[in-house]
Amino acid sequence: MAAVPRSAPLDRLLRPLHKWVWSDHDRRVRKLLIFGDVETDGGRDILRASEVTPDPLLRRLYLEHAIDELHHGVLFRERGEALLRQRALREGGFFSGNPLPGGHGLDDLVVEDQGDPRLLAFLHIAEKTAAGRFAIYKDCVDDDPATRAIFEEVLRDEVFHMNYSYQQLGRLTPERQRHHVWRARGRRLWNRYVRVAAAIAGLIGDTLLTGMYFILLPPFAWAARRAERRETPGWRAIPPDRPASPTSQY
Amino acid sequence: MKILGISAHYHDSAAALVVDGVPVAAVQEERLSRRKNDAGFPLNAVEWCLDHAKLDPGDLDAVVFYERSMLKFARILTCTLRAFPQSWRSFPHAMKNSLGEKVWVRGLIASHLGVDRRKILFTGHHEAHAAAAFLASPSRRAAILTADGVGEWATLTAGTGARGEKTTISLLREVRFPHSLGMLYSTFTAYLGFAVNEDEYKVMGLAAYGRPTMVDQVRKVIRRTPDGAFAIVPEYFEYQTTAARSYSSSFVDLFGPPRPSYEPIDVATAEGRRFADIAASVQRVLEDTLVDIARALQQETKLPDLCFGGGVALNGLANARILAESGFERVFVPPAPGDAGCALGAALYADRVYFNNPDRDIPDHPFWGPAVDAAHLARAAREDDQHVDELDDAALVERVADHLAANRIVGWMDGASEYGPRALGHRSLLAAPHAIAMRDRLNRDVKHREEFRPFAPVVTAEAADRYFELPAGGARLARFMSGVFPVRPEWRTKLAAVTHVDGSARVQVLERSMAPRLHALLEAYGRRSGIPVLLNTSFNVAGEPIVNTALEGYSTFRRCGIDALVAGPAIVTKRATASAKREHVA
């Protein structure tokens, strides 16, 4: 097995937090199920790459990569479900969510728009980050040999994915290999910023809308309820002249 | 006239192009984007339709959206207000969801396509369903029934249609949200641990394992109204107030704990039987209600034909009972009765009703999607060192029949892809229908799906009556796999892989003119096995859309237990290849 890359400095710094996340049954289950979805989605994106690339060797490599990712998805999902069967999740809970960025899904990657060099650089960075993070997770689940075994298996594959994507990038564009990798890093950073910004914007939007809901809506709610009481269930005749103008959205 | 129909934003978005009154292209976005049930704006589908017809957006006379988006928004807002203050959690999400994109449809279409805003038209959601069901059928005058979860306000409509000098579609009455048969079924789908808007057919499959012992309880949550319609009892549901959960605590009190989605269903256990009984009960109530409504419509209209559209029309058991018990002689269900089909329905509605164009017969098949390119398959397979042959039609059919007779699973891609959720012979996985072992192998090695779900057979129209108990009009309903009918008892053991536990099958009755190559294959297989019936299931793996291109078929073939793959004249048989990992390392 090739060497596992060092985890990112931020992840090393957050190791106690990772430990805390994985120490709880509910959070562990949620993380595993999320990983299951992320790996499956990523697998399908890479499958798409295998269908659109003109390069025969890349087609085969992408296909094997996709099969690995889809298999990881199954492993994570089945493990999460097995843990769920042992003990159901608690209801709610403030920290029941997933406070850490996790997985390495390809998000809304449109494979057709990428081109092989960009995609390979993206894959290399994503797999390298994932391998570093999974190496930490593996150590966080020492108390759970079955989950640890999954991380070990996934880690082996991720290291291969990380290496093949880098080498193939070198084959396709030897003179711009590092350039592509740096651009992929930049895009990844930008996407993270956009995600955080969108989350903050969403939070602000939710707060404003909730305020509006309680301040502005009560009289309209009263009127809507009053109107509802007059409605009788069952058939309602459609007036022959109801069809509105073809251009009307109402 | 050139009219583009679009459905989008809720589930199964699609585009369809009608030129001079006849469809020339129609495809669901998911087939191109490769995201199952893709609900996004169907830009890929629109582009493909226009490319296929060699048109620019500027050539279009109209672009028709399948529902009135502001009216839908008004319904969402009204329901939120009615549920005040319990709806406070769902309000921000509902507003962001609607105001972010969904209500600005005119601007969205204008900006994506660059068409004049005055060319952008709208139909009612159920009018689009009605048009898809009626105008694409061979019937000249028919009663029309549409039923789904919800459109703008309507959840079920009844009316009539007439084609001739002037085409009319008259929806006479409707049932309004929250009273909805589609939502009722979806609520039980969620309760039984399946995915809403996707797994409703699993409830139908599970129903066969149960007995309708809980019909009385189901009738407590949906009651019949004196005028022959129905009303849900709101205390048992939450879908009308929140998007978080569709059933209430009272519902759980009535039916017991819901099934967690991660628990496998084992109908041999008491809990598994309870879930199967619940599925059988809601299925029974759905069927009874639809049959009553259809019967009343038949008695009112005295018409022999019924055109049935909307997502509920995907329920083959209910369709078969409507045919048998409502008094209609023929029931037409289009190949895409759900929201995807509304793209075609909206375009046809605009052509015939808004623009008063003369009626035209619509080709009676579902093959409006992209065609498969055999050359792509042959090239990719050869580059992968797979065994490829390119044969003429007759030789290919005989070769495939040999594979099927040897119990091999064949991926079959032929011409244009189907419009709608069913594989009807152009993007199918085919296998011998005889042994249970084949069903289990398909479930395990290819489809990766639950054991309780049945596989469907396809049979030549000439031989259908021999193997299946088809009532009058049954073959028509089975044309697009829209009805579930009994397998004749004497054939059930020989058709075990396609006979459900209750002895039924969702059979496709295939006429030669609809898919000549598959028909020839059925005959060739019949010469070998004595039975011109094949197992026919959609060419995809669980959770993925049906394959569209040859290379999508090929990647599916490579990663699961399909033995041979056919696209046009090319046939690929699987052989072990060197791992690309090793090749890469070397």
Image (cartoon, coloured by chain):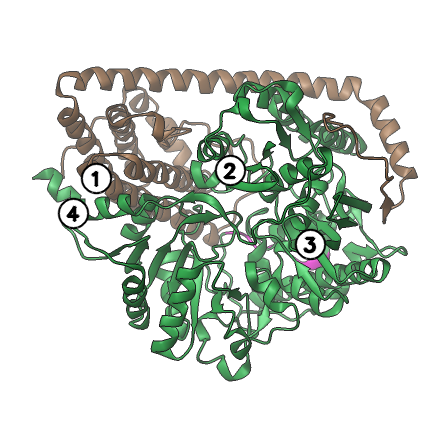
Chain colours: A brown, B green
Q: Which residue is mark 3?
A: B308
Q: Earlier in the sequence, mark 4 or mark 2?
A: 2
Q: Amino acid under label 3?
A: Phe
Span shown in magenta: B254-261
Count residues near mark 3 (Cα–Cα under 10 Å), then give few for <14, some for 14-19, many for 20+: many
- Mark number, residue A61: 1
Q: Are marks 3 and 2 on the same chain?
A: yes
The image shows residue A100 at horizontal and vertical percentages of 42, 27
Res A105 seen here: yes
Mainly helix, strand or loop, the magenta region? loop
- Mark nearest the camera among 3 and 2 is 3
Is residue B35 shown left or right of residue B319? left
Identity of the residue drawn at 61% across and 32% down: B1
**Could you classify mark 1 by the number of other residues whose Cα lies within 10 Å: few (under 14), some (14-19), or many (20 or more)?**
many
Q: How many marks?
A: 4
Residue at mark 4: B579
Q: Write the residue at 69% across / 30% down.
A: B122
Q: Say which of marks 3 and 1 sits in front.
A: 3
Q: CA distance from mark 3 to mark 2?
A: 24 Å
Residue A206 lies within the magenta run: no
- Judge if badges 4 and 3 mark residues of a common chain: yes
